[in-house]
């Protein structure tokens, strides 16, 4: 299996490792040190060698931070991880604090006057550092960049090696556009900003720009590397030699200079006197400091690859449609298994995860999971980011809900889908809450909206039915998704949080409202959607965008109260299921197809 149920940390990590970190801090004259979750590439998912917060504290969530002072320490997490962090972290060593409300800046305001707090400039964005420096100043303390990271020093020889996965071409049949054309197009946008070059540090942007893929990051085919793109479309790509495959230089072509990673700092110095675009949200403060010291003029702007990467071309969209049909057939086989064998002998979480993975493996073309499957039975469903382990594994009970959020990585697309399934007879409350979630899902899916509309402008539509009953959920409604890239991709998203990025044709975004009853069950319904070009509406005055559902798999009809749906919602739901049967039915075995006839029957 690709997914394991082992735990890579335990609560002993804090008591064992924090004293070592404090020794390294003291040797540098530091009274404290900042330990962000992010690594040198600002990744969400980290290679083991870069998961410093996990090694220091035991906490393995995908978002968080730590502060280690000479006499106390704290770990900061958001609402997704409040239960997980208490299981993983020794609270005798670390105080648990909220990442959002106050967060690290509020904690820094409590440090002693005159304290020197160290930070690794390679791990923090400039915007984040500005807030942290201001907080330290208010406390009469100072933030100091370090040459040697105390966590790395304490970790020492036990630290895993940096990943060295080979970097391979992503064929044009999947990429849809030559790298030379991408580089010319993005280079022109750099010139339009009045700049000579751009420093590209986001691994997903490098993979997209050069039409390559790697394997340095778990569940995501990313090459950890950096690049300098010149306004004329030429580029320098910095890779460890061990990652360079035999056919890579020819694939990159003679307009791309392939150089070793240790040449990066010198290459940045070569930009002296030039105007250079760097993204303050995706690149660490080290790049800004190094370029400024070299005499370059830094232009703070969004990574110029971000928007063109988010707006997929026709080849990418056709590829991801096929990936979703293939993946939908695998998921439908799993749902059939749950609806038959799973109702007689309810599975435990590990069995459910393994079964779904086996169906995806049976496609013969699965490259990886797109994230560790969330197979959440019973009360675990109320934890939106739960992942089963050997210790936490639980068997689904009769009369319960099983929430399964999963996805696959294929050369032609990345999938992400959630289905909630009743095991046995669901309660009336479960059916009512699921129907409210479905109403929100359908509201987003059928929306027509004008150019310039942002995800934050439509988020409330997913929540209206829940809000009317005094209910809500504490995560976003949608995130961007790549094509054989990251399952979480910006800059588009659908959430309460303000977002200035309009939803544009070719973007892929998830549609995943939910409801969670603490300790009892969780509900989420998730499809991926493509933003389609604006079209005239009969009788209308302005063209409107719409969504096209990428994800094709049955939604549990037993969890729907038809009386709570409007005629329009019923017709929409029935049309979706008719499409699922039409496109997925021919791809599955006769017994699964026979089950689909019932599972996708009109309400």
Image (cartoon, grey):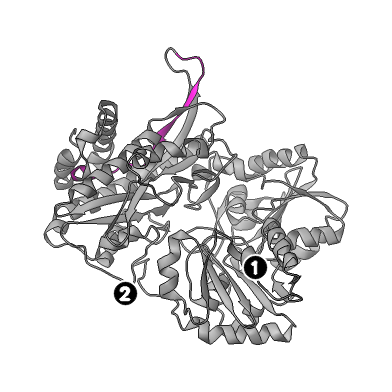
Asked if residue 567 can be seen in this view, the reply is: yes
Location of residue 596 (image quadrant):
top left
Mark drawn on residue 100:
none
Q: How many marks?
A: 2
Where is residue 117 shown, x and y percent of the image? 71, 74
Farthest left residue in view: 344
Whether residue 159 is situated above or below residue 220 in the rendered picture: below
Q: Is residue 216 magenta?
A: no
Residue 97 at what x, y percent from top left? 52, 68
N-term mark: 2 or 1:
1
Q: Residue at x 69, y 70 (%)?
A: 120
Q: Residue furthest top?
A: 539
Residue 481 vs residue 473, the one in the foreground: 473
**Residues under labels 2 and 1: Cα distance?**
38 Å
Residue 267 shown left or right of residue 599 in the figure: right
Is 159 placed above or below 463 here? Answer: below
Instruction: Classify residue 189 as left or right of residue 388.
Output: right
Across and down, in percent, residue 58 comes to 48, 76
| Residue assigned mark 2 | 390
In the rendered structure, which segment of residues is drawn in magenta?
540-558
Which residue is tagged 1? Answer: 241
Compared to residue 486, the image places residue 76 above or below, namely: below
Q: Is residue 53 above or below residue 331?
A: below
Which element type, helix, strand or loop, lies under badge 2? loop
Q: Quadrant of the C terminus?
A: top left
In this rendering, the label closer to the viewer, 2 or 1: 2
């Amino acid at each position: 299996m690709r997914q394991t149920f082992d735990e890579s940390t335990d609560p002993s990590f804090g008591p064992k490792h924090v004293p070592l970190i404090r020794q390294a801090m003291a040797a540098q004259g530091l009274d404290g040190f900042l330990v962000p979750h992010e690594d040198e590439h600002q990744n969400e998912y980290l290679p083991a060698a870069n998961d410093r917060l996990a090694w220091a504290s035991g906490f393995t969530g995908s978002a968080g931070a730590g502060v280690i002072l000479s006499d106390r320490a704290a770990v900061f997490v958001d609402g997704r991880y409040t239960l997980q962090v208490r299981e993983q972290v020794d609270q005798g060593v670390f105080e648990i604090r909220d990442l959002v409300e106050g967060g690290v800046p509020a904690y820094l305001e409590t440090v002693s006057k005159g304290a020197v707090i160290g930070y690794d400039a390679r791990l923090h964005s400039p915007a984040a550092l500005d807030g942290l420096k201001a907080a330290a100043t208010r406390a009469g303390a100072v933030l100091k960049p370090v040459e040697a990271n105390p966590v790395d020093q304490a970790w020492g020889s036990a630290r895993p090696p940096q990943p060295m996965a080979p970097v391979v071409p992503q064929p044009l049949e999947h990429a849809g556009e030559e790298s030379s054309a991408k580089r010319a197009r993005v280079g022109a946008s750099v010139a339009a900003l009045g700049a000579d070059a751009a420093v590209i540090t986001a691994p997903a942007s490098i993979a997209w720009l050069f039409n390559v893929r790697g394997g340095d990051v778990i569940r995501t085919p990313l090459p950890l590397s950096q690049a300098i793109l010149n306004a004329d479309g030429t580029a320098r790509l910095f890779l460890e030699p061990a990652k360079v495959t035999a056919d890579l230089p020819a694939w990159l072509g003679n307009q791309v200079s392939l150089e070793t990673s240790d040449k990066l700092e010198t290459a940045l110095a070569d930009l002296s006197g030039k105007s250079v675009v760097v993204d303050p949200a995706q690149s660490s403060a080290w790049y800004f400091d190094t370029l400024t010291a070299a005499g370059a003029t830094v232009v703070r702007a969004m990574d110029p690859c971000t928007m063109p990467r988010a707006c997929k071309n026709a080849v990418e969209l056709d590829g991801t449609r096929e990936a979703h049909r293939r993946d939908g057939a695998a998921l439908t086989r799993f749902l059939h298994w749950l609806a038959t064998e799973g109702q007689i002998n309810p599975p435990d979480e590990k069995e459910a995860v393994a079964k779904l993975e086996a169906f995806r493996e049976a496609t013969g073309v699965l490259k990886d999971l797109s994230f560790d499957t969330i197979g959440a039975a019973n009360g675990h469903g109320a934890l939106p980011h739960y992942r089963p382990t050997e210790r936490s594994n639980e068997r689904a009970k009769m009369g319960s809900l099983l929430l399964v959020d999963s996805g696959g990585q294929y050369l032609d697309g990345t999938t992400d889908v959630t289905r909630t399934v009743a095991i046995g007879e669901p309660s009336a409350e479960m059916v009512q809450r699921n129907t409210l979630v479905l109403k929100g899902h359908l509201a987003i899916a059928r929306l027509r909206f004008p150019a310039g509309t942002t995800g934050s402008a439509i988020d409330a539509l997913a929540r209206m039915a829940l809000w009317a009953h005094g209910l809500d959920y504490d995560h976003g409604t949608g995130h961007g998704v790549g094509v054989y890239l990251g399952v979480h991709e910006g800059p588009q998203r659908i959430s309460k949080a303000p977002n200035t990025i309009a939803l544009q044709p070719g973007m892929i975004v998830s549609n995943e409202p939910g409801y969670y009853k603490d300790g009892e069950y969780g509900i989420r319904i998730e499809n991926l959607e493509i933003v389609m070009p604006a079209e005239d509406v009969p009788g209308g005055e302005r063209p409107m965008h719409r969504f096209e559902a990428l994800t094709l798999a049955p939604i549990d009809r037993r969890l729907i109260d038809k009386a709570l749906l409007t005629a329009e919602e019923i017709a929409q739901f029935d049309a979706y299921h008719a499409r699922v049967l039409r496109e997925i039915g021919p791809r599955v075995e006769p017994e699964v197809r026979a089950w689909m006839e019932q599972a996708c029957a009109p309400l």
